[in-house]
Structure formats: structure tokens, C-alpha cells
């Protein structure tokens, strides 16, 4: 840390990540013309460092190297150094992460890129220690080597950068193919099945990420085929995560991933997008199975988000760090003595048994492979199994666990909290809005609906420009950075869910407006598909089309399903045509490893069908109308679009947005359901059971 208080060029930035580096002795610049002009004028390469404020290894590299005067002096001599917050500038991160994967076969954060003053990379890596060790080159040695190469072999470096850039630019040349079919869905299932960990749940060995879109796809595949193994994979994963240390049993919420195969030792940071997508997976599993543990878990995640991750204005914060007081997980772990000091003897003995507390700790320090003396609270058995083992009635045990949890939570709240990244991102908020709105609908919980509405109103008021375009980031009263594809696609998803939860026409109208704008700004008019950045965005090395569904789904995957749903809402066939083109653009890429694109496969499942459009015509204040709506919301029918035509409005507002609903009236003054399966309509009905029968029927091929 720069003790004399001198700051670098990051001091005036809004990003919490950039501000964390504002007092480094490294002469950091934000991404922009000033840095690149300086590099050209001084004939220096660029040191590009990309990370985010809650990244554990970003902190380690910062403390070890960027706060070190010796390293800083070398960096300032050899490079012009640029810091980028990947959450603020995912467009830059996407490009240079692809570069790192091309050059090294892997990637991650901190991301370290060395490049020419015209942004062309010639070296890539992730974390570098200060000095060389265990075969990994240290930053000091790396800088000295690059200095020598830049002086003595600059032509070779420039040639290497040129070739790498050409390779990068050729990656996104699509070869449109035929549209997908049911065989691709089966292939996706088979690949997931091959990678499934039958013993512990989840996919692959370690580390294990929640990857909720895998589960959303499997639920749909089970619904389509009745294959019980698909549902068992979902349930095994959700139950294992719920019992494991990846779940915060005291304060709720899900950690980013598990470092082991058994979901015990997490990487402790908490990301907003994980809370949104994981809660959605639990909610859909509840709809499918009626297991209340799943709905309870979703509700607990919302408790965490609404308590700790919600701003006064209603927007949701981005993340909480893994570290506190310089130590990863310190906020979350417990020694046996701490437990005994807080609770009476009976309760502490109960906690030791329930949460598997050990005197020496219950997990290993990764670097030393020795027990830590600390414990990560987790279940190894279900509540019903524990009830039998302990001889305590199940309901009594649940009450007792909740009483103990509240006591431990109260004590934990007094600890030094992890850093909170309090910027508000439109895309991640869109995901949270979608989950809250859907949960409000399924669980009939007004608290979630109000939270979703408030966040939506905030974004549309504070993060939307006068011309209707979205902005990506809000912090300390300022919204900046033109929106990316994910900002539009994810918010449209949230708006669609909010419309189906409220049937307030303003949400559907805004979704349609933003979708139109998304097409204008991001659609590739030559080949099809959506670029990540708008046509008038900053010119970078390449303009990418993201399709990979990683920690979060890609913008194209979510946009695909949005287009389909909006076409069903409005009757606008051009939207469905866009979705068809979009599917063809990426089909060849999808065919080999569809497991990498499971959110896109969710959209494919909608296309292959059966897909349902449903209109309920009736007075919104009438009991029969509301009973019909509640019956629909309680069922797991993922591939449907649901319109309520409120006949008390004259004319019903939905008529302005849809070109077919005006023909659907409440017959004989009773709530009437109109169900169409793959655009083939069933007779209208007043009968809820008949309506549900239609919604569970197949269609004639």
C-alpha cells in the first residue's frame, strides 16, 4: 500500500475493484485512450490485469506484487499498466480470456495479458507469484524477460501478436446449419449422464460448480420423457448442495463453488447470479416434485439476498468476498470451542452431531493438508434421518435447529464481514428479478413480488437512457457503461417473468421494447445471432458472439428463449423467425458438445415441443379466475406462455400488444381457459382439470 497517500489514475473510478488498487505504487490506468496513447508515445507494452473485487487470488496477487515497491518499480519502468473490472467490462474480459485459453489451455482470474499498444496480445496467464517457485515463473522474472524481449526481439513479439489476433478473429466465423431436433436433446442428456457424479451429485469431479442451467435442462428432459434418471440427477445434486458446506446454513445463500467433490469446502465468495439461478433451480424442482425442502431453500436464499444484498433503492448488489481479515472463509467457519462458548451444553452437543463438528476441524488446509481446527457446518444426513438417530421428533428437531441457527447467526453478525461489492449490474439484476418474480407466482409470496418490482423500477428509471438504451453499471448515484447483450436479454427475461406473475401490461410492453432495441443494437445482419457488444460500441480486437453457458448463461441462449416466448405472447412471427435463424447459426457448434450449452438447450426444448400457449379470460377479481391462475402456477409446465385477458378492462390492455387475444372472451361470464399446443388449439374450457389435462398432453406429429 502506498503509505504517503499518493494515488494512481484509478482513484476517480467507481468500480470497487479498481478503487482497491488506487493506492498501489503501480502506476495503474483505467482502460482508455490515455493509457494506450502513453504506451505508443513511450514505446512500451501494455500490462493488462483483469479481475473483480471479490476474487480471492486477485487479492493475493495484489498484496504480494502490486503493493510491493520493487515489483511496482519494475512494472512502471517496463509497462503501461491497465486495470479492468471484468464485471464492468465483460466485453474486454471475454476477448482476453479467450486469448488466455487459446495460449495456455485454461483461464481464470486474475487474468494477466501482455500486449502491444494497439491491444494485440502476445502473452497470457492468470496468477503469478512475486518470485519464481515450483516451476511457475514469478512476476519479477517475467517482467525482466519481457523487457529484454521488447528491446531485442520486438519484431518477433509483434509478429506473434499479429498471428494470435488473426486466429482470435477467425474463431467467431459461424457455419450455420440445420435447426436442432429431439436427438440433440437426447445427446445433451447422455453427455450430462456420463459426467454425473452418482455418489455426490453434480458433474465432473472437482471443483464442482452449481451450474443450475444443467438442472433446468434435466428437469425439462424429465418432463418430456418421463425418464426418472433425469429427475434423480437433479434431486441428488440439489440435496447434496443443500446439505454441503457450499450452502451457508447459518446466514443462507450459496457460495460460488466447491473445491472438492463432496460439496464440503467452498470457495466462499457469494455472487448475485448464483443466488438467482440456484434459487430458480430449487423452485422448479419444487414445482416438479412438491418437496418443500426445495421451496424452503429458495426462500432462504431470498432471505439472504433481501437482507444483505439489496440496496435502499431496490437494486441488488453484485457479490460478497470470500475473504475477511485477510483470510478466506474466516467469517463462515467455527471452532468447536466457539460453539461450546455460545450454546449451552445440550445445544452444543446437538450441533456437534448435526453439523459434524470436530475438535481438530472438519476440513484440510489445502496447502499443508493438515486439519485446520475450524469447521464448516454441513449435514451428512437428512433431517428425517437425524430425527431417527437422535430420537427427536422431526418437527421438534427443525424448531431446535432454527433456534440454534439464530443464536449462531447473531454471534456471526458481530464478526468482521467480508467486503461487499456494492455496484449494481443490470444483467445480474435481471436474473434476480426473474427468480423472485417466478417464486412470487409459484409460492404466492408478495414480498418477493415487491422486491422484483422495486428492482425493475429502479433499473428502468436510473439505468436507462432517454433514448431507451440500457446502462450496465450503477454505483454511488451514477449509471455508466452502455449495456451489453446480457443486460438486455437477462432483463427481458425478468420482465417476462414479472408479467406472468402480475399480468401488468407495462412489464410485457417494456420487454417488447427492449427486445426490439436489442435486435437493432446487437443482431448480426449478415449471418444472424447476437453480438455481445452493440454495433456502435468501442472497437476492440474482435466483436464476439457468446454462446457458451458457463457460470452464467450466454446472452444468445437467454435471448433465444425470450424471442420464442415473446412471439407466443404477441403473435409476431418475425420474432420466431429470428429465433430460428439464431438456432441455425450455432447448431454446428452445439452438436459436438451440447453439454456446454445447456441454457441454449432449454430454448431448444421449447422449440422441439410440445410448447403451450395459454390464455385465461376472466375478471381478475373473480374467484374462478384466480383459482384457475393458481392451479396453473402450482404445476411444473415449463414450456408455456401464459396470458391473462382481464375482461373487466374495456378493452383489455393485452389486446394492444397481441394480435390474437381479442378473440378470447370469458364464455358465459365464467373464467375460460384457451390452450394451444404447438399452435393447435383445444376447445375452450371452464374446467380446471380439463385445462390441466390439455397442458400435460402431447401433440400429434
Image: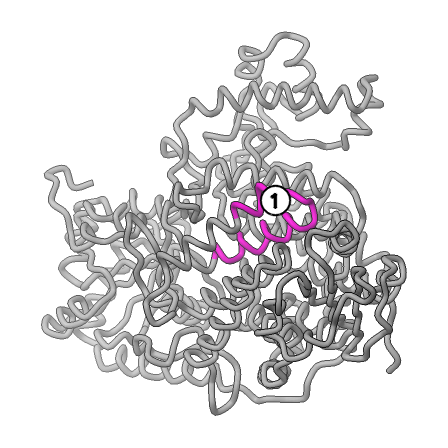
Residue 178 horizontal/vertical position (percent): 68, 88
Residue 648 horizontal/vertical position (percent): 66, 61
Task: Classify the position of the C terminus by image quarter.
Answer: bottom right
- Total numbered badges shown on the rendered structure: 1
**Does residue 136 appear in this view?**
no
Residue at position x 65%, y 32% from top?
Answer: 378
Label 1: state its secondary structure. Answer: loop
Task: Classify the position of the N terminus by image quarter.
Answer: top left
* Vertical placement of residue 291 versus 532, above or below: above
The residue that disc 1 covers is: 260
Q: How is the image coloured?
A: one colour
Q: Is residue 446 magenta?
A: yes
Residue 475 horizontal/vertical position (percent): 32, 50
Q: Quadrant of residue 619?
A: bottom right
Q: Is residue 439 magenta?
A: yes
**Does residue 234 appear in this view?**
yes
- Segment tinted magenta in the rendering: 428-451
Q: Quadrant of residue 248?
A: top right
Residue at position x 58%, y 63% from top?
Answer: 496
Q: Is residue 238 shown left or right of residue 316? A: right
* Vertical placement of residue 265 versus 469, above or below: above
Task: Return the residue nearer the eye: 33 or 670.
Answer: 670
Q: Main secondary structure of the magenta part?
A: helix
Amino acid at each position: 500500500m502506498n503509505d504517503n497517500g499518493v494515488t494512481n489514475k484509478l482513484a476517480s473510478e467507481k468500480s470497487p475493484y479498481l478503487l482497491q488498487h488506487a493506492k498501489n505504487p503501480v502506476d495503474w490506468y483505467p482502460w482508455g485512450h490515455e493509457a494506450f496513447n502513453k504506451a505508443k508515445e513511450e514505446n512500451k507494452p501494455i500490462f493488462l490485469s483483469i479481475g473483480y473485487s471479490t476474487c480471492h487470488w486477485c487479492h493475493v496477487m495484489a498484496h504480494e506484487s502490486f503493493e510491493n515497491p520493487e515489483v511496482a518499480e519494475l512494472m512502471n519502468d517496463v509497462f503501461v499498466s491497465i486495470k479492468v473490472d471484468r464485471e464492468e467490462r465483460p466485453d474486454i474480459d471475454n476477448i482476453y480470456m479467450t486469448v488466455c485459453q487459446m495460449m495456455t489451455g485454461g483461464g481464470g482470474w486474475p487474468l494477466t495479458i501482455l500486449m502491444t499498444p494497439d491491444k494485440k496480445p502476445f502473452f497470457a496467464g492468470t496468477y503469478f507469484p512475486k518470485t519464481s517457485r515450483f516451476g511457475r515463473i514469478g512476476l519479477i522474472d517475467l517482467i525482466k524477460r519481457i523487457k529484454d524481449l521488447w528491446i531485442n526481439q520486438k519484431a518477433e513479439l509483434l509478429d506473434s501478436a499479429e498471428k494470435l489476433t488473426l486466429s482470435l478473429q477467425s474463431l467467431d466465423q459461424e457455419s450455420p446449419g440445420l435447426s436442432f431436433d429431439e436427438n440433440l436433446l437426447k445427446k445433451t442428456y447422455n453427455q450430462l449422464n456420463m459426467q454425473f457424479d452418482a455418489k455426490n451429485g453434480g458433474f465432473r469431479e472437482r471443483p464442482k460448480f452449481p451450474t443450475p442451467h444443467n438442472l433446468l435442462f434435466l428437469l425439462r428432459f424429465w418432463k418430456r420423457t418421463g425418464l426418472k434418471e433425469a429427475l434423480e440427477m437433479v434431486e441428488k445434486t440439489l440435496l447434496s448442495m443443500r446439505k454441503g458446506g457450499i450452502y451457508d446454513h447459518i446466514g443462507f445463500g450459496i457460495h460460488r463453488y466447491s473445491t472438492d467433490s463432496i460439496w464440503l469446502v467452498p470457495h466462499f465468495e457469494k455472487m448475485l447470479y448464483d443466488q438467482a439461478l440456484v434459487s430458480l433451480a430449487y423452485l422448479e424442482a419444487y414445482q416438479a416434485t412438491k418437496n418443500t425442502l426445495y421451496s424452503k431453500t429458495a426462500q432462504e436464499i431470498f432471505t439472504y439476498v433481501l437482507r444483505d444484498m439489496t440496496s435502499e433503492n431496490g437494486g441488488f448488489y453484485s457479490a460478497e468476498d470470500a475473504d475477511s481479515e485477510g483470510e478466506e472463509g474466516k467469517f463462515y467457519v467455527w471452532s468447536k470451542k466457539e460453539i461450546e462458548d455460545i450454546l449451552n451444553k445440550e445445544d452444543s452437543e446437538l450441533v456437534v452431531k448435526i453439523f459434524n463438528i470436530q475438535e481438530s476441524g472438519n476440513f484440510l488446509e489445502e496447502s499443508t493438508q493438515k486439519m485446520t481446527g475450524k469447521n464448516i457446518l454441513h449435514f451428512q444426513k437428512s433431517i428425517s434421518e437425524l430425527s431417527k438417530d437422535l430420537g427427536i421428533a422431526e418437527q421438534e428437531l427443525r424448531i431446535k435447529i432454527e433456534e440454534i441457527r439464530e443464536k449462531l447467526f447473531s454471534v456471526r453478525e458481530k464478526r468482521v464481514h467480508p467486503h461487499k461489492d456494492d455496484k449494481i449490474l443490470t444483467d445480474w439484476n435481471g436474473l434476480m428479478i426473474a427468480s423472485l418474480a417466478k417464486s412470487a407466482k409459484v409460492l404466492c409470496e408478495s414480498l418477493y413480488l415487491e422486491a422484483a418490482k422495486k428492482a425493475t423500477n429502479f433499473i428502468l428509471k436510473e439505468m436507462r437512457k432517454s433514448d431507451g438504451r440500457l446502462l450496465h453499471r450503477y454505483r454511488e448515484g451514477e449509471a455508466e457503461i452502455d449495456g451489453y447483450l446480457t443486460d438486455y436479454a437477462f432483463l427481458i427475461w425478468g420482465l417476462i417473468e414479472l408479467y406472468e406473475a402480475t399480468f401488468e401490461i407495462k412489464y410485457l410492453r417494456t420487454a417488447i421494447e427492449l427486445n426490439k432495441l436489442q435486435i437493432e443494437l446487437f443482431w448480426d445482419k449478415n449471418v444472424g445471432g447476437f453480438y455481445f457488444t452493440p454495433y456502435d460500441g468501442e472497437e476492440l480486437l474482435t466483436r464476439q458472439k457468446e454462446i457458451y453457458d458457463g457460470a452464467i448463461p450466454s446472452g444468445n441462449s437467454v435471448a433465444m428463449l425470450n424471442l420464442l416466448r415473446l412471439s407466443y405472447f404477441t403473435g409476431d412471427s418475425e420474432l420466431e423467425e429470428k429465433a430460428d435463424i439464431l438456432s441455425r447459426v450455432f447448431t454446428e457448434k452445439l452438436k459436438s458438445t451440447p453439454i456446454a450449452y445447456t441454457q441454449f438447450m432449454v430454448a431448444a426444448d421449447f422449440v422441439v415441443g410440445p410448447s403451450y400457449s395459454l390464455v385465461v379470460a376472466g375478471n381478475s377479481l373473480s374467484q374462478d379466475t384466480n383459482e384457475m391462475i393458481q392451479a396453473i402456477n402450482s404445476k411444473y409446465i415449463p414450456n408455456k406462455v401464459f396470458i391473462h385477458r382481464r375482461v373487466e378492462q374495456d378493452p383489455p390492455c393485452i389486446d394492444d400488444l397481441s394480435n390474437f387475444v381479442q378473440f378470447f372472451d370469458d364464455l358465459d361470464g365464467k373464467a375460460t381457459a384457451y390452450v394451444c399446443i404447438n399452435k393447435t388449439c383445444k376447445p375452450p374450457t371452464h374446467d380446471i382439470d380439463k385445462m390441466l389435462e390439455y397442458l400435460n398432453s402431447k401433440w400429434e406429429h
